Amino acid sequence: MKLLENKTALITGASRGIGEAIAIKFAQNGANIAFTYLSSEERAKALEEKLISYGVKAKAYKSDASNYASSELLTTEVLAHFGAIDICVNNAGISRDNLLLRLTPEQWDDVMHANLKSVYNLSRQVIKSMMKARSGSIINMSSVVGVMGNPGQSAYAASKAGIVGFTKSIAQELGSRNIRVNAIAPGFVETDMTSYLNDGEGGGKWLHKIPLGRFAKPEEIAGVALFLASDMSSYVTGQVISTCGGIY
Ligand code: NAP
């Protein structure tokens, strides 16, 4: 029996990077996958086909995580197609890095809406069916930057710290319904978001601070997500799992 057999997972922002790795890992472990993207239509379609090749149901949805009405519609459509949402991974996110003096109100709002409001948007929807089922696992993608801070990333760090407070609060609200809510706080992961790490200078200043001496692969974050999604973590809720190579 595979770890996520007969489960359906809804994953936001899975057309690339960490979300894509989580979708693949979950499908390999038997889960049906509903996932979202914003603009990467071709990559999303390719992923949908790949997931189906693992013998599970999979469907890509173009849906803006920062928009409340879109999240409501998405949940309705996924429930109609898959019949249940057992696991929700709030992964979609962006970075708009700038020192505070140059950080515009638009940049601040974009980051807050895409990274933090998005987690509220979808969590508020998926808990309705999870409460009826008296079962569920919600996984929110925070960041080591949310606890550590990082110059040039005040908006991003604030959004990721906000996810921690939100996660711990709703874990306490929903525990009695057997809905577990946890966050993952990755360090630096090799994806498009951190492509600046490849330019030697950008990455070099961090490498020597990471005890494991390297950046993470998206699959290494997906492994932690699999643990939190599955019954292997049935007594884990309200936690932030640091997955940062020991940097913090
Ligand atoms: P990425 O490679 O830039 O991919 C971002 C994904 O999110 C894409 O699938 C993108 O869709 C989607 N997305 C962005 N805005 C969206 C929106 N409003 N609605 C729906 N989907 C949206 O990012 P990543 O590095 O995989 O990061 C994934 C998550 O992990 C983020 O929350 C990020 O903050 C967090 N994280 C990343 C790192 C790291 O080092 N990479 C470290 C800690 C935490 P499109 O392809 O359609 O644009």
Image (spheres, rainbow, N blue to C red):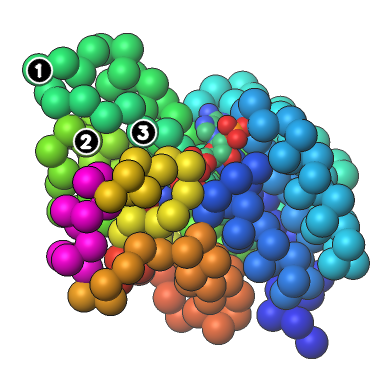
The mark that comes first in sequence, 3 or 1, is 3
Query: Residue at the location (87% across, 58% down)?
Result: 52
Q: Is 144 displayed left or right of 151 in the figure?
A: right
Q: Say whether residue 40 is visible.
A: yes
Q: Amino acid at mark 1?
A: Leu
- Looking at the picture, tell me which residue is in the foreground, 119 or 150: 150
Query: Residue at the location (85% across, 42% down)?
Result: 80
Q: Are marks 3 and 2 in contact (CB under 8 Å)?
A: yes
* Mark 3 residue's CB less than 8 Å from ligand 1: yes
Compared with residue 84, is residue 80 higher up or lower down, i.e. above or below? above
Q: Amino acid at mark 3?
A: Ser
Q: Amino acid at mark 2?
A: Gln
Across the whole image, how many numbered discs are drawn on residues? 3
- The crowding category of the residue bearing disc 1, from other C-alpha atoms within 10 Å (few below 14, some 14 to 19, many at least 20), is few
Task: Please tell me whether mark 2 sits on a helix, a strand or a loop.
Answer: loop
Residue at the spot of label 2: 153
Q: Residue 45 — which label?
A: none
Task: Please tell me whether mark 1 sits on a helix, a strand or a loop.
Answer: helix
- Looking at the picture, tell me which residue is in the foreground, 119 or 222: 222
Main secondary structure along the magenta-highlighted residues = helix
Q: What range of the chain is rendered magenta?
A: 201-210
Determine which quarter of the picture holds residue 23. bottom right
- The crowding category of the residue bearing disc 2, from other C-alpha atoms within 10 Å (few below 14, some 14 to 19, many at least 20), is some
Query: Residue at the location (75% across, 55% down)?
Result: 33
Q: Say whether residue 166 is visible.
A: no
* Mark 1 residue's CB less than 8 Å from ligand 1: no
Residue at the spot of label 1: 101
Query: Residue at the location (80% across, 58% down)?
Result: 51
The spot of residue 186 in percent (x, y) is: 36, 59
Q: How far, Cα to Cα, is label 3 from label 2?
A: 8 Å
Determine which quarter of the picture holds residue 96. top left
